[in-house]
Image (cartoon, helix red, strand yellow):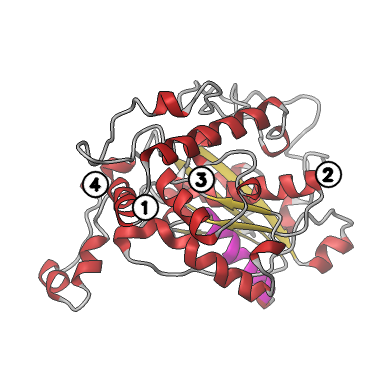
Amino acid sequence: RGAPLKAPQPRHDQDATDPASSAYLIPPSDVQDICVGNVLSPPTSAVSFRMAALSADIPHTTSLSTTNRQCSSGLQAIANIAHAIQSGSISIGIGAGVESMSSDPMHELYDKFPPQVDWEVVQNCRHSRDAMGCLIPMGVTSENVSKKYRLDRSALDRFAAESHRKAARAQSLGKFRAEITPVGDVSRDDGIRPDTTAETLSKLKPVFDKAEGSTTAGNSSQLTDGAAAVLLMSREEAVKRKLPIWGVWRSYVVEGVPPDIMGVGPVYAIPSALQKAKIGAKDVDIFEINEAFASQAYYCIRTLKLEEGKVNPNGGAIALGHPLGCTGARMVVTLLNEMRREGKRWGVVSMCVGT
């Protein structure tokens, strides 16, 4: 978001439409299924994604579906493909996520697509408080977390500033180059602000509770456009094709929490995922926890007693942005690259999920 995009120019050094070209890790026809996570695009987005796949020379024999688990849609897309491989339905697939928050603004969502429910039933059911809580704006849920757990505004601003510092350092060292495919003139994240400090952030006014709030534009994730994709296959396929194995899918967990404090999700999901993988938090080398808001990310890290140096070592969504459907997939890509670079073994991706 913010950078002008020009249509990518055709490359003359290789023919990307030739399946034998070195542009391909595997022949496109070998991909059996694709799942794309997305949140804000109109219902016709499924058609758009299928057209995009065909335009990328992936044949019509490769099926495609979409999934929407709000902020973790990209991660859910990867999970769907991983589970299809584990069950034997397919052996090769792509899990991806995409969002254009400049084209489909989040604040217009309920105006364009209000929930179609029987309001009398919803407001009088046994779980009416939680049901109506699903309508609470995400920024207000951030304030709810801050107030409920008595989070200090200055701590949140320091957390946000640190996200920018880490991301700026990673960018200057070229850490993101391996995981970014240039699109037109854009080849780097443009939301990172190296000069950000807690002091400058402290001057910003709260957005959702103007009198006593702690959530500002500076300690929240940025509204961003983005896309990410991960190629998955069975070990048998990878070995047969002599491909490097960057990571192994060990466990996946989703935990429900009250909608009005949705940001606390990782506090419950991470221990469950670790238990399924039969490891402890101390065994994990790197945690990628989405920074939807400094409030919820800071709270989750503090409550789980995670080592700060292990969490988001290259910054997070406060600096890099949070294109809703994309972020889960992007975090997996970032995690795998960092683990490979640093020779680490165990990594965790986790995020809160708006209702």
Q: Which residue is painted at 24% across and 46% down in the image?
A: 112
Please provide the residue range marked out in magenta.
73-86
Callout 4: 10 Å neighbours few (<14), some, many (20+)?
Answer: few
Label 4 sits on residue: 112
Callout 3: 10 Å neighbours few (<14), some, many (20+)?
Answer: many
In percent of width and height, residue 332 lies at: 63, 52
* Residue 206 to residue 129: above or below: above
Q: CA distance from mark 1 to mark 3?
A: 14 Å
Q: Residue furthest left?
A: 120
Label 1 sits on residue: 43
Of the image marks 4 and 1, the number of the one nearer the N terminus: 1
Q: CA distance from mark 2 to mark 3?
A: 27 Å
Q: CA distance from mark 4 to mark 1?
A: 12 Å
Of circles 2 and 1, which is in front?
A: 1
**Which amino acid, by three-letter code, is at mark 1?**
Pro
Q: Quadrant of residue 21?
A: top right
Between residue 232 and residue 218, name the one nearer to us: 218
How would you classify the magenta stretch by its main secondary structure?
Answer: helix
Of circles 2 and 4, which is in front?
A: 4
Of circles 1 and 3, which is in front?
A: 3
Mark 2 residue element: loop
Would residue 2 be found to the left or right of residue 23 on screen?
left
In percent of width and height, residue 270 lies at: 55, 65
Label 2 sits on residue: 20
* Residue 37 to residue 89: above or below: above
Image quadrant holding the C terminus, namely: bottom left
